[in-house]
Amino acid sequence: MSSYHLDHLQYLETEAIHVMREVAAEFERPALLFSGGKDSICLLRLAEKAFRPSDLPMPFLNVETGHEFPELIEFRDRRAKELGVKLIVRTVEEAFQKGIAQPTPGVVSRNQLQIPVLLAAIEEFQFDCCIGGARRDEEKARAKERFFSFRDSFGQWDPKNQRPEIWNLYNARVNPGENMRVFPLSNWTEMDVWEYIKKEKLEVPNIYFSHERECFRRGGQWLPIPPPHTDATKPDPYAGARPKPTDTVKKMVCRVRTIADMISTGMIESPADSVDDIIGEVSAARVTERGTRADDKASEAAMEDRKKAGYF
Amino acid sequence: MPHSQHPIELLRFNTCGSVDDGKSTLIGRLLYDSKSLMEDQVEALEKSADITGGGQINLANLTDGLRAEREQGITIDVAYRYFATPKRKFIVADTPGHVQYTRNMVTGASTANLSIVLVDARQGVIEQTRRHTYIAALLGIPHLVIAVNKMDLVDWSQARFQEIRDEIEDFLPKLDVFRDVKFIPMSALNGDNVVDASPHTPWYEGPSLLAHLETVHIASDWNLNSFRFPVQWVNRPNNPTDPSLHDFRGLSGQIASGIIRKGQQVVVLPIGIKTTVKDIWSHDGTLDEAFCPQSVTLCLEHDIDISRGDMIVGIENLPGRNAELTARVCWMHQRPLQPGKKYFLKHTTQTVQAVVAAVENKINFNTLEAEETNAPLGINDIGTVRIRTAKPLVYDGYGTNRLTGSFILIEQGTNLTVGAGMLNAPTEAVKPEYTDFAI
């Protein structure tokens, strides 16, 4: 074998760097969606590799449901500061106040409500492109998505009429009001992400590692018990997402495999407390990572329907 | 960057063939038999089988991820799948069979090392077989597998297999040369010769499909000749705190071909100035050399005005430079390619305006002959066209360089990607009036 040869991680890395530089060169006002989760952590390192020694040429954007793990928020804010990048946060709560979004009666999860908040933020800042950490191996509607995924002026994805994407020639042209979502990690698998985190010695929020936590059983998942409701002047944001007296509650040694918010993230029982342990777990896993996501369990087309409406 | 240990290679392949040839079933079978499926995926399959499939698990549901695809039982868009064996990692593009989705097949195949063309053993070679084999050849995919599927339905007849093989070998010489072509008899539905060798084909001595995918030689698929570096982004820090970066001016991009070393002479095109590579910068430190397809940042000896779309090349084997170009174009939109109409043409890292001056010929997929015509190219047509660009392109023939020899056409106004083009080799290399850089 020739010594001028890239292994699979180096190949995925150079492909992703190329995509990020295309974004910087072709768009006027791009943003990078940074949640503090493992995939967007890889995006940050790739952005450093693509643009250093210059400043990263785009702000970070995050949409909060208000149900986040506090550890994730702390990590997100700190990383943005360390990298010297402006972090823009928009919340579902603010959107309620402004009347952009309405709570769905009987539904506690605000997963769907991130859509209008994201679209409003795109409009507010006139972003013409958002880089996201989605991967095609996560879910089968995502498996159909392009690196450069076009959204019309309503933020909608039209899976039947996607622009053909040939070689590494990405068509980045959008008209005013339209938008592009760009996914540099399209070809990465869950395993690739962890191998990259190991190789690059990237810090991840500690909830990815094994810890003790009280959880309760619902919908076939172990969900974390939300923080206590302290401010009695306001309604409980977690009303309906707390264990009922009949629910099984258990103190578990557990960690997250994928992070949504506290309402949509199933905890997995695991003693893995290092990246090596996690890699071992992923390679032996018998369910996909989104199998622990309550938001995907709704129906076989749950992700496709949300993406058509403007989801990440 | 030589490796001390044997790296895990990545093989990208796509599957194509006509509707109902069993492409999605084949991929489902590869994933299922190589134990790449997870329990919740199997559970989702079984759930949909109970509701819609009368209890029969449909392996195609694994890749047909869109509602409309499951409703119609066909593949509409390219679906990408990922799996790994201890020997290799794989990216699979499952590309649609319907004629109206040929553009998606081009999409899936353009980045592949290997193409699998499925043939239904009962139907034999049909127009779609020729079309897909032709496209794989046109796109310069080095490795081809003809999977003769549904062999169980022709009683595993060696004569039938040979008949199909003969017919394909008859037209292969008309196509651009594949590095290797393999014929494999199989039943994707039952798993014969997909992962494990089949007991039904004692007359077949070759490997199973997976065994072939794990061992086919792909290390030389990247082009390490003739250095080409399209400048993608100019890297110039604003107000750096590190004083050594005050004069930093880097040219960022992905190496399209060849190898570059620190201290090596290069030519900047189109202006034609010769200079030297001072540094190969990367976030992990400076490098002594870099090669295709690495993404790096080059610093040059002289401060030359260079921007996105320019190309830095080695001083030998120079590319061509012309505004009058001939290319084979695959057309991808219902509105036909209109001679005289202006399009945007994206080539490497630059986008220029272009006009199609004339259509010279069009491929007839029954005969695989190029037939002279001056009619516009319709959707899914492939033909030779002459193009004039508003600014000369620095380019190579697609046959020698897939990345500097390809372009896409974008319709103005709608911004749709309407065509994919492969440039003919330039008739002569650029002859820059070398002014060695002097102040």
Image (tube, coloured by chain):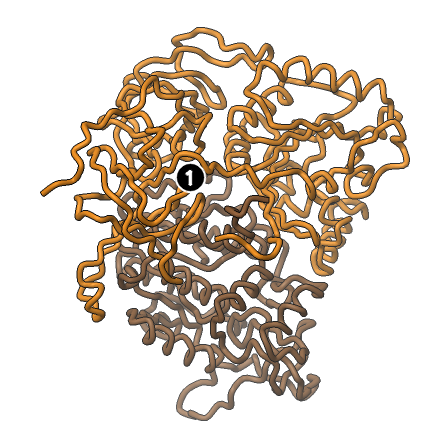
- Which chain is drawn using orange? B
Picture residue at 54% right of the left edge, 68% below the top:
A198
Q: Is residue B401 left or right of residue A136?
A: left
Position of residue B267 measured from the top left corner of the image (x, y, whole percent):
26, 37
Mark 1, other Cα within 10 Å: few <14 / some 14–19 / many ≥20: many
**The color chain A is rendered in:** brown
> Which residue was labeled with disc 1?
B258
Residue for point 30% across, 64% down: A59
Q: Give the position of the C terminus of chain B as an image quadrant.
A: top left
Q: What chain does mark 1 sit on?
A: B
Amino acid residing under circle 1: Gly
Residue that sits furthest to the front in the current view: B263
Relative side of A49 to B158, left or right: left
Element under disc 1 = loop
Query: Does residue A181 appear anywhere in the picture?
Result: no
The residue nearer to you, when weighing B61 against B164, is B164
Residue at image location 37% in from the left, 35% down from the top: B416
Which residue is at 72% across, 30% downward?
B147
The furthest residue to the top? B372
Q: Is residue A245 above or below residue A33?
A: below
**Residue A245 in the image: x percent, y percent?**
67, 88
Residue A99: image x %, image y %? Answer: 34, 68
